[in-house]
Image (tube, rainbow, N blue to C red):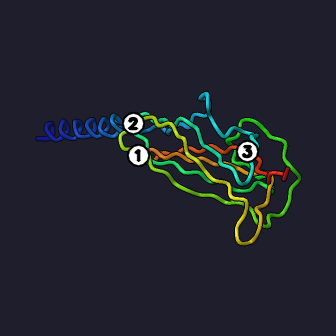
Amino acid sequence: MKKFRKISLSLFFVFLLFACTQSEGIDMQKPEIDLTIQEASPLNCNVFYFGETITLHSLLKDNVELGTYSVDIHHNFDHHSHSTEVEECALLPKKVAINPFVFIKGYGIPVGQTSHQTATEIELPTGNELGLFDEGDYHFFISLTDKQGWSTQKGISIKIFHKLEE
């Protein structure tokens, strides 16, 4: 009986060891935001103008299934960093935000996709009820989450100005 108990206990621990180490079928990879495609936009250091449209052209990829993505545009008047930028852009002098442009919106991706090419248009209004938006340094921040919940982000430094009247 003792021998049977030892064998049973040993088999149980061996089974437990293999059951805990197998990760087949479990998504353990973060999704990717590819801005190296030919028509990629925006790119670091691009200049845009209020009253126009920014089109996000990117290739979103995941090894199992994509979930959602979001875009966040916010000021960088304080010169903060998201540590995802590869290239440094020349920054304007620091300043206090008075009426900064802010944009935050989430987007769905069709179910079952492992890659999705975006062509998301974002209007840059000239202002709001407080007046014209502050021009200067901004971040265009993209966040991508896969179906499992893994996420990746990409911060892009851009400038947004008001067009001069001709």
Compare marks 1 and 3 and give the one earlier in the sequence: 1
Label tally: 3
Quarter of the view holding residue 129: bottom right
Residue at screen point 45% across, 50% down: 108
Q: Toward the viewer: 88 or 131? A: 131
In the rendered image, residue 10, in percent from the top left (x then y), is placed at 24, 37
Instruction: Tell me if 125 is positioned left or right of 137 in this view.
Output: left
Quarter of the view holding residue 126: bottom right
Q: Toward the viewer: 3 or 20? A: 20
In the rendered image, residue 66, in percent from the top left (x then y), is placed at 43, 42
Q: Secondary structure at mark 2?
A: loop
Kindly check if marks 2 and 1 are in contact, taking CB atoms under 8 A apart as contact: yes
Farthest left residue in view:
1
In the rendered image, residue 107, in percent from the top left (x then y), is placed at 49, 51
> What mark, if any, has residue 157 been given in the picture?
3
The residue that mark 1 highlights is 147
Dot 3: few (<14), some (14–19), or many (≥20) neighbours within 10 Å?
Answer: many
Give the alpha-carbon distance from disc 2 to disc 1, as whole Å: 8 Å
Give the alpha-carbon distance from disc 1 to disc 3, as whole Å: 28 Å
> What mark, if any, has residue 64 been given in the picture?
2
Q: Secondary structure at mark 1?
A: loop
Quadrant including the N terminus: top left
Closer to viewer: mark 2 or mark 3: 3
